[in-house]
Amino acid sequence: MDKPIGSWLLFWPCGWSIAMATPPGAFPDIQLLLLFGMGAFIMRGAGCIINDMWDQDIDGMVARTKDRPLVTGEISPLQSLVFLGSQLTLGLLVLLQLNLYSIILGASSLVLVILYPIMKRVTYWPQLILGMTFNWGALLGWSAVQGSCDWSVCLPLYTAGICWTLLYDTIYAHQDKIDDIIIGIKSTALKFEDKTKMYLSGFSSTMIAGLITSGILTAQTWPYYGAVGLVGVHLANQIYSLNIDNPVDCAKKFMSNHRVGMILFAGIVLGNLVKNSVNEEDDNIKQELKIDSTSTKRNEH
C-alpha cells in the first residue's frame, strides 16, 4: 500500500482494454474498472509474496531488498504461505464476478505469476515473462466487456504492453545490477549493458506501433492518437535523459511510467466519446445525402 506503483502498472493495461472495448460514446463501466482495480491490487500483492518466497535466499545479499520481512525473520515462510492463500482466494472471488471466458483466461495467467521469479535464475530475459504477466489485463479487460477477445485488437495492445514493461523494468533492473552480478541473477539490464538505450528505443517504437494498430482497428479518433503521441514524447524523453548508472534516476524514471498509463487511458476514453460524435455526424451526412437524392429523383420524375 505504501508503494502503489506496482498496482498501477498492473492495472493500466486492464483499464486500456476495458475503455477500448466500450461502445462508442460511452464511458467505461466504473464498476468493472473498480473490480479490476481491486484485482490488480490483490494480485500485485500475491505476486510480491511469491517473488519474496522464491528470493528469500538471495534478498539478504542485495542492498535494496535486505530488509524484506522474510529475510529479517519478521514473517515466517508459513505465515507468508497463509497470507498468499488468502490473497489468491480474494483474487479468485474478484475473478468469479466476470464471465466464464474471462474466468478461464484470468486463471491461466497464474502460471506466469509463479514462473516469473524462476526466470531471473535461468534467462537474461525475465522482464519478458514479467511483461507477459503484467499485461494479461490487456486481454482480460476486453473479454470482460465483450465476452471474448478480439485477437486482432487485443494482441497488438498486449504486445505494446509487453514492450512497455520491458522498457520500464529494464530501467528498474539497473538499480540492482551490481548486486545481481555478484549473486548470479540475470536481467535485461545486464544483457543490454551500455546498449540499453538502443534496446529501450526499439521497445518504445514497437509499443507505439502496437497502440496505433489497435487504434486503427477500433476506429479510434484524434484524442487517442494525441495521447499516443504524448506517450511517445514521454518515453523518448525518459530514454534520452536516463542515467543507467544512477540508481536514484532509474527509480525516478521507473515511477514516471504511471503517467504513461494515465495519459493513454484518458486518450482512449476521450477518443471513444469523440468517436460517437463522428458517427452521429456521418449519419447526419448520409441522411442529408439520402434526402437530396430522393428530392432529385422526384424533380426528374
Image (cartoon, rainbow, N blue to C red):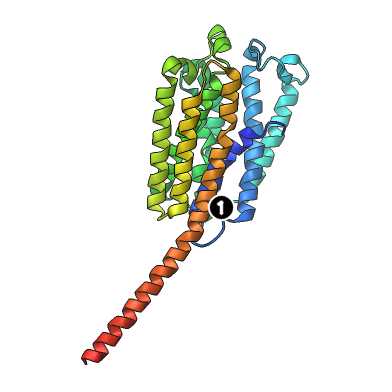
Asked if 56 appears above or below 254 in the picture, the reply is above
Specify whether residue 62 is in view. Answer: yes
Furthest-left residue in view? Answer: 300
Asked if 59 appears above or below 99 in the picture, the reply is above
Report which quarter residue 51 is drawn in: top right
Q: Nearer the viewer, residue 142 or 110?
A: 142
- Residue ID for mark 1: 99
Report which quarter residue 210 is drawn in: top left
Please give the name of the residue rendered at 37% of the width and 73% of the height, measured from the top-left corner.
285
Question: Where residue 191 appears, x then y in whole percent?
Answer: 44, 16
Furthest-right residue in view? Answer: 74
Please give the name of the residue rendered at 51% of the width and 23% of the height, measured from the top-left corner.
242
Amino acid at dot 1: Asn
Q: The residue tagged with tag 1: helix, strand or loop?
A: loop
Side (left or right) of 27 relative to 299: right
Please give the name of the residue rendered at 21% of the width and 92% of the height, measured from the top-left corner.
301
Asked if 112 appears above or below 295 in the picture, the reply is above
Question: Where residue 25 appears, x then y in whole percent?
Answer: 51, 62
Q: Nearer the viewer, residue 140 or 258?
A: 258
Q: Number of numbered discs present?
A: 1
